[in-house]
Image (cartoon, grey):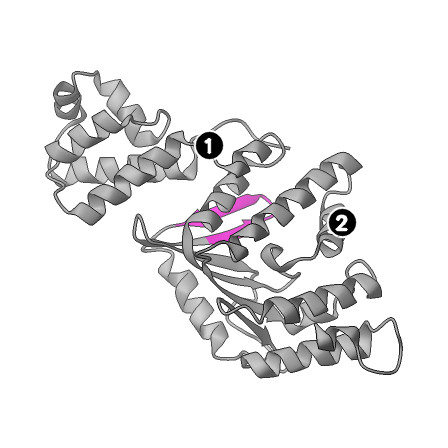
Amino acid sequence: MPTESRPTLRAQWLGQSLRELRDANGMTLARAADFLQRNASTVSRFESGEYPIRRPDLMALLDLYGVSDRHKRDGLLRLSEEVWQKGWWDGYEPDVERQFVDFVWLESRATEIRSFDPSMITGLLQTRDYATAVVTAAEWEAEPAQIARWVQLRMDRQAVLHREAPPRLQVIIDESVLRREIGGPDVMSGQLAHLLAIAKLPHVDLRVLPASIGAHASLSGGFCVFTIAEPDLEVGYAETVGGSVYVEPPASERFVRVYTRLLNGVLGPAESAKLICAIGEDCYDPAGPGPWPGRSG
């Protein structure tokens, strides 16, 4: 169930940027508040993300802090607009944790997404049947209507891969995930066929981490790295039993290094497709002997 309301990630980023700019200029909250003709507690709420700053106040503070670089100004102004604007994902806010609404927003803003998951196919590449099996297993206490709502969110997220300017998606799939029978043979057969089809998109780079690699750099679990153009940063994301974690630079550099390390052990695109096809034929072909349906997908 959703947790209590808290500032969105984008509101926190904007507030953090304002606090860093104020500190860099050696100004107190009182000085900034006097300039805006507001009280210090209001500026403090701007910086904590508890209350989104309006565009006129933001432009005034950027002037006060001497931010003349056009790229930086435009990035912060755009971020402030998105703090106030509602996206399609906000309609799901009553159904999911606030942290995951932030995750979907990151997907929508990213120019590149790097993903590694050792337990299941990443959500952006799941079929509806596979997603239903995954969500049902993870949320065994939920009502069918709620499960359907969560699955629909997962399907809606996938539109990001088919928009006019999609992000570059790089996915590393552990071989064990391809062999884990989620939803039964028919569901897995359809899922693997879908992987082969989606891997043909020019902005999707799908690689398999073979079991023969043994121990690897992320035995502790899966994670994502989002590259965001405005503001210019790379954000690490990981899920735990206790909740989701977002990691910003410089700590997120560890995520990038681990992902690069994993890439050293993966199969190439052609070899990955060949292995997916072989597993589909050997393990999940409901038609029995003969060409696996996924081969033509």
Eye-nearest disc, 1 or 2: 1
Left or right: residue 23 versus residue 126 is left
Residue drawn at x 54%, y 66% as measured from the top left: 171
Q: Residue furthest front?
A: 164
Q: Secondary structure at mark 1?
A: loop
- The amino acid type of the residue labelled 1 equals Lys
Residue found 60% across the figure and 32% down from its top: 2
- Position of the C terminus, as image quadrant, is bottom right
- Whole-angstrom CA distance, mark 1 to mark 2, is 31 Å
Which of the 4 image quarters holds residue 271? bottom right
- x then y, percent, for residue 253: 36, 61
- Using residue 230 as the reference point, say whether residue 166 is left or right of it: right
Q: Earlier in the sequence, mark 1 or mark 2?
A: 1
Find residue 261 and name its label: none
Which residue is denoted by mark 1 in the rendering? 86
Please say if 85 is above or below 278: above
Q: Which residues are magenta?
A: 237-247
Quadrant of the image containing the N terminus:
top right
Tell me the amino acid under the disc marked 2.
Ala
Q: Residue furthest right?
A: 288
Residue 188 in the image: state x and y as whole percent.
Answer: 77, 65
Q: Point out which mark residue 137 bears.
A: 2
- Mark 1 residue crowding within 10 angstroms, few (<14) / some (14–19) / many (20+): few
Residue 115 spot, x, y in % from top left: 52, 62
Residue at 40 percent across and 64 percent down: it is 256
